[in-house]
Amino acid sequence: MHLYSATATARTTTLAYGSRYRAPTVNHFLTFTLFHHHNPRPPQTSTFSHFPRFPNVNFLTGNSPIFRMEKFWSGSGISKNKAMVEQLQRYGVISSQKVSEVMEVVDRALFVPDGNPPYYDSPMAIGYNATISAPHMHATCLQLLEENLQPGMHALDVGSGTGYLTACFALMVGPQGRAVGVEHIPELVTSSIQNIEKSAAAPLFKEGSLSLHVGDGRLGWPEFAPYDAIHVGAAAPEIPQPLIDQLKPGGRMVIPVGNIYQDLKVVDKKLDGSVTIRTETSVRYVPLTSREAQLQGY
Ligand SMILES: C[S@@+](CC[C@H](N)C(=O)[O-])C[C@H]1O[C@@H](n2cnc3c(N)ncnc32)[C@H](O)[C@@H]1O
């Protein structure tokens, strides 16, 4: 279920809930967590019987590198942020030195709510029907956006949640750049600021090149547009036009698109203003939606 494709441009056939693959849960035999990316309830577990819906022969035969990685991960008790990054490197999720460095420097434990294993490669509930995305998903998006996160560039993180990726963006674009998080749950913005204030990105927040805002991310954040990089952390039924408009020529947006079946789309705006869109992989996120819709039943 949670497989990572080492081929950056190839579409994988694997579907994942908030992630492409997942470390096993506490069950003695190998089970996999099937919980909605933003479901605040404890994860439900499921056995292999769910997997025929997500065909991947390598997975079913256990030949996938990530399958082996899951087993290793569950048994190793990884407890250090650096070790988590090294694992992501070892299994080809991270190939960029810069992405490794930034993920090593931003300790994920500062962003994961207490009581959760911070370095598990799994999304985790953060309240308000939201989750912090899995480490491999963060890494994947950082890699896809790396060229557009050079020092001095502008980056927008829509659905910034815990602030983890916004912090990474800020460190990549540096004090001459601008990293902007937009999140529509005010409580999450407050807690994300607290997280960031404890992190390596705190000086950038203090001096103002990193900012977090309460707002409807479907509208982007025009104040600091155009953006070299836009990341959207929730699935849109279609790509919001304001986000395309706020993308700089030469810029790149990474956004999950779809409803039940979703694809991570890579949107490139060429220098002449034309836009190309390709599919990176299949994913599963909760919707990019209104605050009211998200909080229904919460
Ligand atoms: C999967 S979470 C990702 C959080 C973040 N990337 C992280 O890892 O901490 C998606 C986030 O998008 C937010 N969201 C959903 N719809 C939104 C909207 N219209 N405007 C702003 N934020 C939105 C949710 O509240 C949630 O925090």
Image: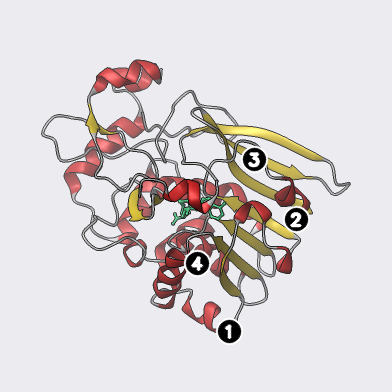
* Local SS, label 4: helix
Residue position for label 4: 167
For residue 266, which numbered disc appears in the image? 3
Q: Which percent across, then down, holds residue 259?
A: 53, 31
Q: Residues within 10 Å of mark 3 (few under 14, many from 20)?
A: many
Marks 1 and 4 close (CB-CB < 8 Å): no
Q: Residues within 10 Å of mark 4 (few under 14, many from 20)?
A: many
Looking at the image, can residue 89 be seen? no
Q: Earlier in the sequence, mark 4 or mark 2?
A: 4
Tag 2: residue type? Answer: Gln
In the picture shown, does residue 51 fall above or below 221? above
* Local SS, label 3: strand
Q: Earlier in the sequence, mark 1 or mark 4?
A: 4
Q: Which percent across, then down, holds residue 162?
A: 43, 62
Tag 1: residue type? Answer: Glu
Q: Residues within 10 Å of mark 2 (few under 14, many from 20)?
A: many
Between disc 4 and disc 2, the foreground one is 2
Residue position for label 2: 246
* Local SS, label 2: loop
Q: CA distance from mark 4 to mark 3?
A: 21 Å
Between disc 2 and disc 3, the foreground one is 2
Residue at 79%, 40% (x, y): give it.
275
